[in-house]
Image (cartoon, helix red, strand yellow):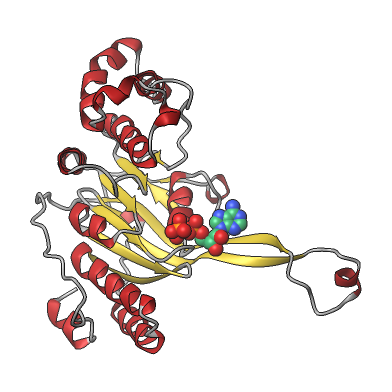
């Protein structure tokens, strides 16, 4: 997204809002498509305690179901060498999108094609809270298919990347959410997966740990990997990603360079927090007007094989 487009769309920062300077990231060439998301929608039917219009069922105390449209018609293509941040307010569909790419959920409509099985680092990744961080590293690495010897070799690197010091010997249930997230990141990133999905893991941590995480992410990208990173913190996205997607109520509002997209989102969020709802609406409208969808047909790419993430799409 060119700078002029941002300016003409009225997306300059207002006076008083702190400006972040874009960080010079490690430059990695962008390669072939690794994940293709097409017309993806995820709807949930959920019971509501809200009273109906007074029909018989409602008078008998039956609960009604409503449809929550968590993801609405999202389309994009991710390529190797990209780290893609997903930003958006609470409930905008960020985690749902990641879970569908991971193959943990089946979409209501649309398809996800990928060149490899994504490694998913969710906030609730199944580790054992009673066991120490170190024991969980072993467990996690074994669960990812490493042999006992590979596990032994990988442990020092994972422990260093997690940056937990002596706390690595304490039970995981004693960790703060940030400490747990760092450990999960270190375990998942040690596999150097082709596609890595990270949900809210890197917003915390000291400068040195952040630096190491960033370097590891760059390594994965350099080895032709793609990373998705979900975060509420636009600044994390600016620092860690090359590209960002802004979701709002399940819809894609903007897809472009991380700095511009995160900045546009931050300004919108800032206006919402100040009660400037008209201005925020206009910003959403302006951002949507700039949205350019990235498309590619699987046969456009010669050397990769794409696998559907969901059985019903096979
Ligand atoms: N399993 C589920 N059943 C019903 N509704 C769900 C389910 N998972 C998510 N939702 C709803 O879908 C919408 C999107 O949720 P999602 O967790 O993807 O958003 P998010 O952007 O990751 O939110 P947050 O930033 O708060 O973590 C929300 O309205 C949420 O309540």
The quadrant of the rendering that contains the N terminus is: bottom left
Q: Is residue 225 above or below residue 266?
A: above
Q: Is residue 277 above or below residue 248?
A: below
The residue lying furthest to the top in this view is 149
Whole-percent x and y of residue 87?
34, 62
- Identify which residue is drawn at 22% across, 52% down: 82
Residue 268 seen from this side? yes
- Identify which residue is drawn at 25% across, 55% down: 236
The answer to whether residue 33 is left or right of residue 15 is right
Q: Quadrant of residue 133?
A: top left
Whole-percent x and y of residue 303?
26, 44
The answer to whether residue 115 is left or right of residue 312 is left
Residue placed most toward the observer, 178 or 293? 178
Q: Is residue 234 above or below residue 166?
A: below
The answer to whether residue 27 is left or right of residue 9 is left
Residue placed most toward the observer, 16 or 54? 16
- Identify which residue is drawn at 41% across, 58% down: 37
Whole-percent x and y of residue 20?
15, 66
Residue placed most toward the observer, 117 or 20? 20
The answer to whether residue 234 is left or right of residue 116 is left
């Amino acid at each position: 997204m060119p700078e002029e487009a941002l300016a003409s769309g009225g997306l300059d920062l207002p006076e008083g809002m702190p400006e972040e300077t874009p960080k010079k990231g490690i430059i990695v060439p962008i390669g072939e498509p690794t994940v293709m998301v097409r017309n993806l929608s995820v709807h949930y039917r959920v019971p509501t305690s809200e009273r109906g219009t007074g029909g018989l069922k409602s008078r008998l105390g039956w609960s009604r179901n409503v449809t929550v449209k968590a993801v609405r018609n999202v389309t994009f293509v991710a390529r190797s060498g990209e780290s893609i941040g997903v930003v958006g307010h609470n409930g905008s569909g960020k985690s749902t999108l990641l879970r569908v790419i991971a193959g943990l959920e089946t979409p209501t409509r649309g398809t996800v094609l990928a060149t490899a099985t994504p490694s998913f680092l969710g906030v609730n990744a199944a580790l054992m809270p009673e066991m120490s961080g170190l024991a969980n590293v072993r467990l996690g690495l074994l669960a990812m298919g490493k042999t006992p010897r590979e596990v032994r070799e990988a442990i020092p690197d994972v422990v260093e990347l997690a940056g937990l010091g002596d706390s690595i010997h304490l039970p995981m249930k004693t960790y703060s959410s940030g400490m747990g997230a760092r450990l999960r990141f270190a375990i998942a990133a040690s596999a150097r997966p082709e596609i890595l999905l990270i949900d809210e893991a890197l917003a915390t941590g000291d400068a040195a740990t952040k630096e190491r995480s960033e370097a590891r992410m760059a390594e994965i990208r350099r080895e032709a990997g793609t990373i998705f990173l979900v975060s509420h913190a636009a600044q994390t996205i600016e620092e860690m990603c090359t590209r960002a997607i802004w979701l709002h109520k399940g819809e894609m509002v903007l897809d472009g360079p991380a700095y511009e997209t995160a900045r546009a989102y931050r300004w919108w969020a800032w206006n919402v927090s100040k009660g400037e709802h008209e201005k925020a609406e206009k910003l959403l409208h302006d951002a949507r007007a700039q949205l350019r969808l990235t498309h590619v047909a699987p046969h456009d790419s010669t050397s990769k094989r794409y696998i559907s993430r969901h059985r019903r799409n096979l």
